[in-house]
Image: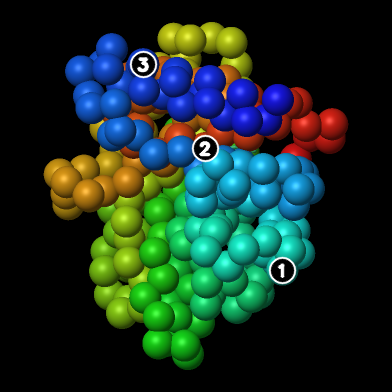
Amino acid sequence: MVTANYQEIIRRIQKTCIESGRPAGSVSLVVVSKTQPAGAIRELYDLGVRDFGENRVQELLDKKDLLPADIRWHLIGSLQTNKVKYIADFIHLIHSADRPDLLAEIDKQGKKIDRVIPVLLQVRVASEETKHGCLPTELPGLVRFAAGLTNIEVKGTMTMASFTDDKEQIRDEFLRFFSVIPDSIRNRPDSLFSTGMTSDFEEAIRSGSNLVRIGSAIFGERSAPV
Ligand SMILES: *Cc1c(COP(=O)(O)O)cnc(C)c1O
């Protein structure tokens, strides 16, 4: 089931790319494996999938121990500064860098191990209540702050749209997300724009996303909300 779901998602991503006039391979997928057991990840790994996203550091570390070392782990959930040290030496991409103290801590841990750690700056555009992501008005300052740090590389930006059926609202939020990205990031050909989940990834791709994070459409509904 998981394999068939995965293949169907890949097909829908490619179809949406082509319908939007973009190459079929221009959008990457991070498979969101939070709450899923290592065995479910393994099934996709055996198909060749390497990018997996987790939102909790401890859960990520537990699964990492059980799975092959060439998995590219993405931290997609909010990150406490005191947890950075546990993931600094291997994390492929931190999607949720959203404040100066967190950037400073990632930089500090990167220095200790002589690694430049790739991050996305998370922006809050959803109208629903959420603590996560910097405000659009804070983004330019965060970009400048990160530019002064030697052991961080800002690869792009990330956002989550509101969890709603209102397609127009979601489209507006994605539009807002892309409109607030500073030119220095937006115009770089290799920038990553991480947005789109099970409920809205096609809209996200049409809006310009090139990195979608999808969990429940592949693994089935999670029993507990996280
Ligand atoms: C859970 C989660 C996703 C995936 O959500 P689905 O609706 O299961 O596809 C994507 N991004 C973040 C930040 C998440 O926490």
**Which residue is depicted at the point 84% across and 31% down?**
223
Q: CA distance from mark 2 to mark 3?
A: 17 Å
Relative to residue 55, is residue 11 drawn left or right?
A: left
**Secondary structure category for the residue under label 3:** helix
Q: Quadrant of the C terminus?
A: top right
What is the C-alpha distance between the residues marked 3 and 1? 35 Å
Label 2 sits on a secondary structure element that is strand
Closer to the eye: label 1 or 2: 1
**Compared with residue 225, is residue 22 higher up or lower down, i.e. above or below?**
above
Front-lying residue, 225 or 133: 225
Residue contact between numbered discs 3 and 1, judged by CB atoms under 8 Å: no
Q: Is mark 2 within 8 Å of ligand 1?
A: yes
Determine whether the beta carbon of the residue marked 1 sits less than 8 angstroms from the nearest atom of ligand 1.
Answer: no
Q: Residue at x 47, y 62 (%)?
A: 92
* Residue 95 image position (x, y, % from top left): 48, 52
Q: Position of residue 12 (x, y in %)?
A: 45, 18
- What amino acid type should be assigned to the residue bearing mark 1? Asp
| Residue situated furthest front in the rendering | 46
- 35 sits to left or right of 130: right
Q: Is residue 168 left or right of residue 77?
A: left
**Disc sitting over residue 160 in the figure:** none
Q: Earlier in the sequence, mark 1 or mark 2?
A: 1
Report crowding for label 3: few under 14, some 14 to 19, many 20 or more residues within 10 A (C-alpha): some
Q: List the residue tagged with mark 1.
A: 65
Q: Which mark is nearer the camera, 2 or 3? A: 3
Residue 50 x/y as whole percent: 51, 51
Quarter for ligand 1?
top right
User: Spatial distance from mark 1 to mark 2, Cα to Cα?
Assistant: 22 Å
Residue type at tag 2 = Arg
Element type where label 1 sits in the image: helix
Q: Which mark is residue 213?
A: 2
User: Which residue was labeled with disc 3?
Assistant: 15
